[in-house]
Structure formats: structure tokens, C-alpha cells
């Protein structure tokens, strides 16, 4: 563990992000546009061309057009008209909703028009965040508090190190390994305490993470995936065309599977410790066999969890591709479909292998029979320890 920690710290220093200078002309924010918060007071149908379809609720997305009256917060009582076109007209805005707007096209002495920047969704996000925190604290108590603390630290590592390192051109696979290892150190030991049980879960997770990384890189290479299959990645190529997008795809695969790996490995480690407490007479081989019986049930229930998680995230893509009248083999070979399949199966193999890896490490590091017997209050000559019965069936 000391060696892994030292390597992780060295990796953080080596891969620490440098300042990224975007190519000239690739500005993501328009100059002179100042967002202003306001509140919608009314929604009316927008103007339509004579030959255009209806612009109200019956219009398609391309032709949808509404006009919102917005009262600006910084200018109490002042109403401005904001045109809602396309997707924004379909967002379901109602009077009373908060929005961020900006004045565009204004020149000296001539006012411009007002455009919608985004709906103000912070109040809704805050409510759900509070509900989530309260639910975790009420149900999980102290453990839940440390789990939330670990989640905050994980966010700091992700947004403070991993994402800036990727945008600055650092090797994506190494960023995934080093960043994920740092997250595991914090999350596991914060949530579950410093113990051999937690350490065995860490080792199982780390080994599985390396397997997942290797399989992901191999799958991306063999399937000839470019990593450029969405509007977001296409936009990235215009801004940061020198990035290694196949490696970034592998990095995303590792990050996506990290949470599920943690769940499986800590459960497996805890199972071995509980089996040892209930059966101090069991050999390490028997402990491993018992833990694997529990692990097989865990795999059966978890493997489709990760598949459906990926399917839910890519549901719009699945719906779109299902409408193409193409043979199944062609659909499966498309970049979008192949990415999801490699991502799902690569994470799934790592998840499956995490069970025997963690169970084996836990069976080797859990206290021996004599130590377990002392902790359970039985000596080596306790007749119940040697007698056949329910404990031997574990």
C-alpha cells in the first residue's frame, strides 16, 4: 500500500495539468454578452412565416417558436421580450420560472434584442441535492456522512486534476489510473475506516481497475474506435485537435466502472470477514469458497445493473439507431454502438474478475483461525468449534 501510495503521489506530480492555451479564434464565450437573471411573466405564440407550420404546441421542434415576457431582476418592473426557438420552446417554460437572458446586437444609442441563455435550474438542483444528503444521513448515519465527504473529495480530484490534465494533453490512460487510485484511497478509507478489510477491498479494486484499463485499451484498439462519435467530441476536435481521443475513450470507460467496482469489492471483503467471524474454524480455502458463493450472487445481480446503466445513458442513441433500416451487423458495427458495447463489456469483465481477486486477497489477509477464535470468545479446545453443525455449512 505504501508503494502504491508513493507511485500515486509521483503520478499526480508528473501528470499535474499545465495551462492550456486554446487555438486563436476558438473562443467559447462571446465577448460583451452579460447574463441577466429574470423571471418569466407570460408566454405567447411567436411569429411564423406564412408558409411555415404552426408555431404553438403542435409545431415540430425545428419550427417551434414562442415569445416569453421576462421581468429583469436588476431592473424591477422592466419587461423584455425573449424569443424561444426550437428546443427552448419545447422546454416547458411557464410564468414564474427563472431564466438567464442577455442583450444582443446592441450598439451605441440603439438597444438590441434579448436572447435566452439558459433556464435557471439551480433551485431544483439544490432541492434534489438536499433531499439526497438528508436521505443518506438518515439511513446511513455516520457512514453516510463519510461517504458524502468521500464524494466531495472525489469531485475535487475529478474536476481539479483529471479533467484539467486531460484537456492539457496529459496521457489519458495514465490520468485515469492515477486519478482513480487517488479517489479510491480517499473514498474507501474515509467511508469504511482504516483496516485490513478496507485494504483488501482496495487491493481488489485496484487490480480490477488495471484489468479494466487494459481490456478497454485493447478493445478500443482492436475495434478501431476513433473516440469521436458525438457532437461533444466533434467540438473538442475543433478546440483541442491534438488530443488522443481513443485514449480518452478508455479513460471514460475506467471512470464509469469505478463506482460499481468499489461497491462489489467492499461487499466481498466484508463477506469474507463476516464468514470468518461466524466460522473461526474454517480454512482459508473454505473462506474463499464461501466468499465466492456470495460473490456469484452479487455478480448475477450487478452485471445487468451496469448494462442497464449504460443503456439508460445512451437511450436516445439506441432509439435513433433502431429507426435505421439496416442489418443488425451493420448497426452493431457503427462507432456509436461499438463504443457502448466495448464500454459495457470491458467494465463488465473487470467487474466479474473483481470478485475472485478481492475474495482471494481478503481470504489471505483476514485473521487466522486462532485469532478469529479468540475474537469470537472460543478457545482452540472449544467443543463447539470442532463439532459439525450449521457453522461448518457456511
Image (cartoon, grey):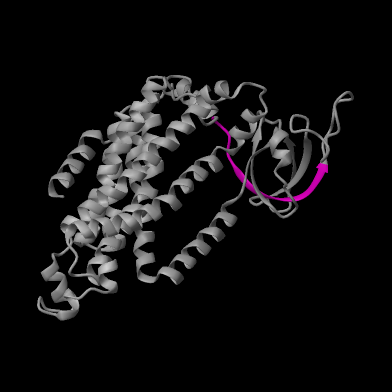
Extreme residue in the front direction: 388
Left or right of 68 on screen, residue 283: left
Q: Quadrant of residue 20?
A: top left
Picture coordinates of residue 3 (x, y %)?
13, 45
The residue drawn where x is 83% and y is 35% is 55
Whether residue 42 is in magenta: the answer is yes
Picture coordinates of residue 307 (x, y %)?
49, 42
Marks counted in the figure total 0
Left or right of 13 on screen, residue 310: right
Picture coordinates of residue 378 (x, y %)?
15, 79
Vertical relation: 366 (above or below) 307: below
> Which segment is the magenta one?
31-44
Q: Nearer the viewer, residue 59 or 313?
A: 313
The residue drawn where x is 34% and y is 39% is 162
Left or right of 368 on screen, residue 188: right
Picture coordinates of residue 298 (x, y %)?
39, 54
Extreme residue in the right direction: 50
Q: Give the prevailing secondary structure in the magenta stretch.
A: strand
The residue drawn where x is 73% and y is 40% is 90
Left or right of 118 on screen, residue 364: left
Q: Quadrant of the C terminus?
A: bottom left
Q: Quadrant of residue 61?
A: top right
Vertical relation: 46 (above or below) 272: above
Residue 201 appears in the figure: yes
Q: Nearer the viewer, residue 186 or 119?
A: 186
Q: Nearer the viewer, residue 208 or 153?
A: 208
Residue 185 appears in the figure: no
Vertical relation: 229 (above or below) 67: above
Whether residue 382 is in magenta: the answer is no
Vertical relation: 7 (above or below) 270: above
Amino acid at each position: 500500500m505504501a508503494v502504491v501510495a508513493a507511485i500515486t503521489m509521483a503520478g499526480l506530480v508528473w501528470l499535474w495539468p499545465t495551462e492550456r492555451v486554446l487555438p486563436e479564434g476558438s473562443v467559447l464565450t462571446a465577448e460583451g454578452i452579460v447574463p441577466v437573471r429574470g423571471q418569466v411573466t407570460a408566454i405567447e405564440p411567436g411569429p411564423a412565416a406564412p408558409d411555415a407550420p404552426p408555431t404553438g404546441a403542435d409545431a415540430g421542434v425545428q419550427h417551434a417558436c414562442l415569445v416569453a415576457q421576462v421581468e429583469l431582476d436588476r431592473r424591477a418592473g422592466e419587461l423584455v421580450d425573449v424569443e424561444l426557438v426550437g428546443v427552448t420552446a419545447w422546454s416547458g417554460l411557464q410564468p414564474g420560472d427563472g431564466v438567464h437572458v442577455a442583450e444582443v446586437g446592441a450598439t451605441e444609442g440603439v438597444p438590441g434584442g434579448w436572447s435566452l441563455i439558459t433556464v435557471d435550474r439551480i433551485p431544483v438542483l439544490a432541492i434534489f441535492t438536499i433531499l439526497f444528503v438528508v436521505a443518506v444521513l438518515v439511513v446511513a448515519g455516520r457512514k453516510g456522512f463519510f461517504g458524502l465527504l468521500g464524494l466531495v473529495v472525489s469531485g475535487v480530484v475529478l474536476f481539479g486534476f483529471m479533467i484539467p490534465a486531460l484537456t492539457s494533453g496529459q496521457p489519458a490512460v495514465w490520468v485515469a489510473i492515477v486519478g482513480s487510485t487517488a479517489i479510491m484511497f480517499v473514498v474507501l478509507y474515509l467511508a469504511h475506516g482504516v483496516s485490513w478489510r478496507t485494504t483488501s477491498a482496495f487491493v481488489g479494486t485496484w487490480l480490477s481497475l488495471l484489468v479494466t484499463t487494459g481490456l478497454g485499451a485493447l478493445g478500443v484498439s482492436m475495434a478501431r474506435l476513433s473516440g469521436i462519435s458525438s457532437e461533444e467530441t466533434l467540438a473538442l476536435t475543433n478546440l483541442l485537435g491534438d488530443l488522443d481521443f481513443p485514449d480518452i475513450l478508455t479513460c471514460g470507460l475506467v471512470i464509469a466502472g469505478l463506482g460499481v467496482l468499489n461497491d462489489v469489492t467492499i461487499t466481498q471483503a466484508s463477506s469474507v470477514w463476516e464468514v470468518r467471524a461466524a466460522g473461526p474454524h474454517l480454512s482459508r480455502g473454505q473462506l474463499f469458497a464461501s466468499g465466492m458463493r456470495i460473490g456469484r450472487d452479487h455478480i448475477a445481480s450487478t452485471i445487468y445493473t451496469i448494462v442497464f446503466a449504460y443503456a439508460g445513458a445512451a437511450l436516445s442513441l439506441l432509439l435513433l439507431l433502431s429507426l435505421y433500416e439496416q442489418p443488425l451487423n451493420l448497426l452493431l458495427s457503427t462507432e456509436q454502438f461499438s463504443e457502448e458495447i466495448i464500454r459495457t463489456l470491458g467494465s463488465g469483465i473487470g467487474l466479474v474478475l473483481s470478485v475472485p481477486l478481492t475474495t482471494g486477497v481478503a481470504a489471505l489477509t483476514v485473521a487466522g483461525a486462532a485469532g478469529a477464535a479468540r475474537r469470537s470468545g472460543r478457545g482452540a479446545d472449544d467443543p463447539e468449534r470442532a463439532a459439525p453443525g450449521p457453522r461448518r455449512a457456511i
